[in-house]
Image (tube, grey):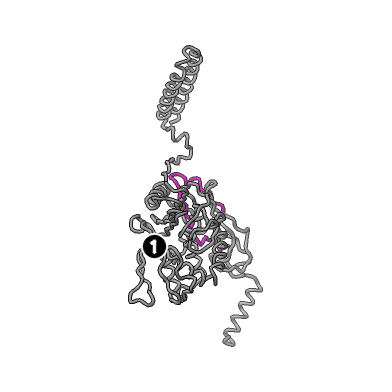
Amino acid sequence: MVIRRSIACILLFAYAFFYSGAVYSAQGAYSGDVAYSGLMASQAASKFEDAVLQSAGLSAERISNPSGVSSVVPPSTAARAAVVMEASSRRVLYAKNPHMKLPMASTTKIMTAILAIEMGNLEDVVTVSPMAVGVEGSSIYLAKGERLTLEQLLYGLMLRSGNDAAVAIAEHIGGSVENFVRLMNRKAVQIGARNTNFVNPHGLHDDMHYTTAYDLALISAYAMENPIFRTIVSTKYKKIPWEGRSYDRVLQNKNALLWSYEGANGIKTGYTKVSRRCLASAALRDGMQLVCVVLDCQPWFDDSATLLDYGFANFKPYTVVSKEQVLGHIPVRDGYEAQVAAVCREEILLPVREGEEKEISVEIELPQYLKAPVKADTKVGYVKVTLGDEVSIRKDLYTAADVKENTIRSNLKRIIDRWLDTEFGF
């Protein structure tokens, strides 16, 4: 291999020397042929270089991309803005105008639902107020005084996009729609969606009600971590009561990808005349959960499927740290054991292109020692996983076990306690 590469370098040098001399001596001969001659020379040089590189066992693609990661042209989309994100790492796999502020229509209800799940009790009975009756747009036709559980309203919210259900939920959780909206905006900041502003819980148009494709992907990824949320948004059909009628409401999910796309498990459609078609979708394959957001996209289902395909085809899940993996041992002073293991309670998974796992950096921070006694599940440090400038994940590390104190004083106390238990039956 060394000899072949040496020969290749000699040939390249010889070619460059003779070719440059020939060009120099021919300058000014026929000015009308300069452009044509330059183009032909360039093409010839390219072919020659490719041949030399191939003889050395290399390729032009490999030279221009030293990491060995193959470059793939991302698909186009009609969406005004779009993002594909891996849910656990929040890594962006595809982006088009990710930070453009746009209306989001009923994808708003992702935030409404996750807040209600986190702050409410699914078995709570909600009495529908006059404010929740007859809200314009999509509806599950709630009646004043009707009583449904919070869980039933959430299915009406996420499957049939009931604007009336959104108001009923907001009033129940926040005490008023206005207070619930404050909770929505506070949660958005906590999640990291700093270019988002909510004015209502349903998404009916308001100039001050907006998000970005990136922010909505963050909110969607956060919501998909909740098992109750995942169950609701992946449900195709659901029956809920219809008070005063002899039959139930039959809810069919508006998200067509649940029927047509392999692994689809969410999330929410949205449409107004101003926002046009918006869709936050999700799919799980081979242990990798992707979310896809398209804003103002006429072929919303087709384009979302194409973008999800791109993510699954070009990125594969790579487990950097396993759940409960021991990442170090900490010396324990005055303990019955000399050290205690530090473990990561969560899995750290990254979506990577082929060969990219070699570029992952793992940093572990632990104290020099601990003083006994040590309690299990005590936070003692962290692990930080980075991949270039794109990904930075930090997870806390915890002690794996108790370590009892081993000193004269502690041992004497244990002896006395044991004697008292035996002698007096304490």
In the depicted structure, whether residue 130 falls above or below residue 384: below
**Does 355 lie within the magenta span?**
yes
Verify whether residue 16 appears in magenta: no
Tell me where residue 118 appears, x and y as whole percent. Answer: 50, 68
Residue in front for this viewpoint, 172 or 92: 172
- In the rendered image, which residue does mark 1 sit on? 234
Q: Nearer the viewer, residue 402 or 285?
A: 285
SS of the residue at dot 1? loop
Examine the rendering and report whether any part of residue 342 can be seen. Answer: no
Range covered by the magenta-colored residues: 338-363
Q: Nearer the viewer, residue 141 or 227?
A: 141
Task: Tell which residue pokes out farthest to the bottom in this image.
Answer: 424
In which quadrant of the rendered image does the N terminus lie? top left
Q: Position of residue 33 (x, y in %)?
A: 44, 16
Residue at 62% x, 74% y is: 411
Please identify the quarter of the rendering in which residue 416 is found.
Answer: bottom right
Q: Pointer 1: residues within 10 angstroms few (<14), some, or many (20+)?
A: many
Q: Does residue 221 appear left or right of residue 183 in this picture?
A: left
Under mark 1, the amino acid is Ser
